[in-house]
Image (cartoon, rainbow, N blue to C red):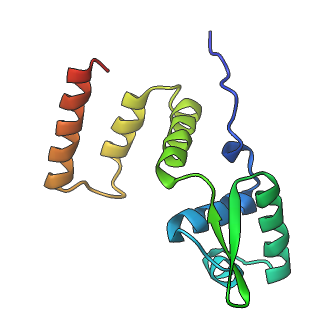
Amino acid sequence: MHREQPMSQQAQLSRRERQIMDSLYSRGEATVLEIQSDLPSPPTPTAIRTMLRILMDKSLIQRHKQGREFVYAPTSPRRPEGTKALKHVVQTFFDGSFKQALAAQLASDDEALSDDELREMVKLIKAAREKGN
């Protein structure tokens, strides 16, 4: 029987909140205008500030003053959040099977992996096997 995993707070974000978080993770930190430049059909700076306040209330981002502007940054490091997001995608779209997700990626014509990337993946698989994963 399929058991629902509780969704992380990141998975419960609105589309715009997710886009803002993507911008912040991509840049590391950003001002309102930098975030606005990353968004498709961007809302006004005031609307972005409102969403940033909501994300701060959710403890997903923090801010500090730099000159006359606030600079916003995620509160969690990029890698653990990426791992959580990947697990969510694998669970949602591939019935929890990392093998199916990897096979879909490898079969995709969108982006071919280089020989170096494939060799690195083989090394990671061997290391995981030795750890007993």
Instruction: In the rendered view, tell whether residue 74 sits above or below residue 69.
Output: above
- Which residue is at the front of the view, 8 or 65? 65
Instruction: Count up the numbered dots.
Output: 0
Q: Taking 2 as reference, is 14 left or right?
A: right
- Which residue is at the front of the view, 84 or 15? 84
Residue at (50, 31) in percent of width and height: 94
Q: Position of residue 74 (x, y in %)?
A: 62, 60
Q: Position of residue 47 (x, y in %)?
A: 84, 75
Residue at (65, 16) in percent of width and height: 3
Q: Position of residue 86 (x, y in %)?
A: 50, 41
Instruction: In the rendered view, tell whether residue 80 sits above or below residue 128.
Output: below
Q: Position of residue 119 (x, y in %)?
A: 14, 45
Residue at (82, 55) in percent of width and height: 57
- Which residue is at the front of the view, 11 or 69? 69
Instruction: In the rendered view, tell whether residue 111 sits above or below residue 86.
Output: below
* Quadrant (top left, top right, bottom left, bottom right) of the N terminus: top right
Query: For residue 40, what is the image quadrant?
Result: bottom right
Q: Taking 114 as reference, is 89 left or right?
A: right
* Quadrant (top left, top right, bottom left, bottom right) of the C terminus: top left
Query: For residue 49, what is the image quadrant?
Result: bottom right
Residue at (24, 54) in percent of width and height: 113
Q: Taking 41 as reference, is 105 left or right?
A: left
